[in-house]
Amino acid sequence: MYEQIINNLNGTRYERDYPLSDMTSYRLGGNADLVVYPDTVDEFDRILRLLGDTPRAVMGSGSNFLVSDEGFRGVVISVKKLNKMKICGNVLLCQCGVKVSSAVKCCLDNCLTGLEFAVDIPGSIGGMVAMNAGCYNKSTEDAVCFVVAENGTYNKKQCEFAYRKSRFLSSGEAVYSVGFLLKRAEQETIDGKLSKYKGARSKNQPKGNSCGSVFLNEGFFAGKIIDQAGLKGYRIGGARVSESHANFILSDGGSAQDVYDLIKYVKRKVYIDYGIELHEEVRYLGKFDENRT
Ligand SMILES: Cc1cc2nc3c(=O)[nH]c(=O)nc-3n(C[C@H](O)[C@H](O)[C@H](O)COP(=O)(O)OP(=O)(O)OC[C@H]3O[C@@H](n4cnc5c(N)ncnc54)[C@H](O)[C@@H]3O)c2cc1C
């Protein structure tokens, strides 16, 4: 089925039937039919056009994906090789596969401030922009100047950022590279901010395989409500609600379906107890069984 695509990859690395558990922070999920690894943005663009209507998913660091145990019948494009950065004045240009931590380090080295809040977000720049990732009352949109994407170049307003949303997440349009508009600052000042943010996270963030916060905080703290519903420590198979931060669902190595079932259980219990509908921040890939719990 994928012969035509493979024959036209022109030397781009690919894997057939590849386990997506190797590519996600949950370390769960079955295989993708095909994974491709473009190493230039032009190649990325060419592959997306080559795929046409073939089901596809762009994967950055895989830190916000829950992949089904059956895997994904389609093509995953891993952008991890698109990891170049450049500084032009106060603008940091990053290809989509740059790790957020590398971009923050580059800012520190070059006395640029504005991205410190993201220091421990374990994602790629493309995923960060698509998700409009954020913490400590800051989000990616605060620093974005422009985004070069599959269908054109967008200024910040055109990116349609909202809480954990962007036009890229809504439409599935791939992000190629991003320009961040930053400010000059003393290295010591930047370093001080980084230490503050790192300290806060190491105190509050549960250890173990997860996707970070599972649910959106839409005018309330999802973790607080889940805690009030008595669900801290609640377990289904290999998945459990963290005892220290109830918006985290950790996997001890069971199945992706366990995590999915626990997410649905938490949603149901919170709705029954409080009439509140929780919505997922985590992105699903592949098919899950809706009827197990
Ligand atoms: C321990 C832990 C802590 C976390 N803390 C935070 C936090 O503080 N704040 C926060 O907001 N998030 C947090 N997250 C969630 C996650 O790290 C962020 O959402 C991150 O921005 C996702 O980036 P990624 O590259 O891993 O994206 P992926 O998981 O690979 O993908 C997530 C979504 O983005 C899309 N995407 C990825 N790359 C591209 C691209 N190039 N073009 C278009 N779409 C793309 C994917 O298709 C998918 O829909 C945390 C996760 C973990 C595991």
Image (cartoon, rainbow, N blue to C red):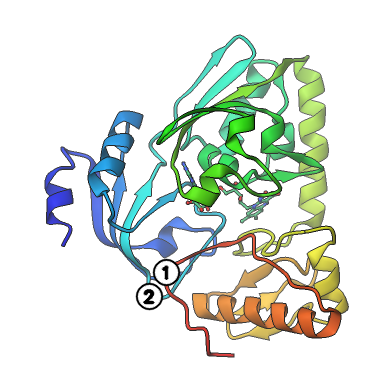
Asked if labels 1 and 2 touch by Cβ distance under 8 angstroms, the answer is: yes
Where in the figure is residue 136, as x and y percent of width and height?
81, 43
43 to 134, vertically: above or below: above
Up/down of 285 relative to 154, above or below: below
* Tag count: 2
Left or right, 282 with reference to 215: left
* Location of residue 246 with respect to 157 vertically, above or below: below
Residue type at mark 2 is Glu
The mark found on residue 286 in the picture is: 1
Question: Is residue 263 or residue 203 the one in the foreground?
Answer: 263
Tell whether 33 sits left or right of 157: left
Mark toward the viewer: 2 or 1: 1
Of label 2 and label 1, which has the lower sequence position?
2
Q: Nearer the viewer, residue 88 or 205?
A: 88
Question: Could you tell me residue 68's position as x and y percent?
Answer: 45, 72
User: Distance of mark 2 from mark 1, alpha carbons?
Assistant: 7 Å
- In the drawing, does residue 70 fall left or right of residue 262? left
Q: Quadrant for residue 194, please give it.
A: top right
Residue receiving disc 2: 70
Is 165 left or right of 269, judged from the image as shown?
A: left
Q: Residue at x 49, y 58 (%)?
A: 24
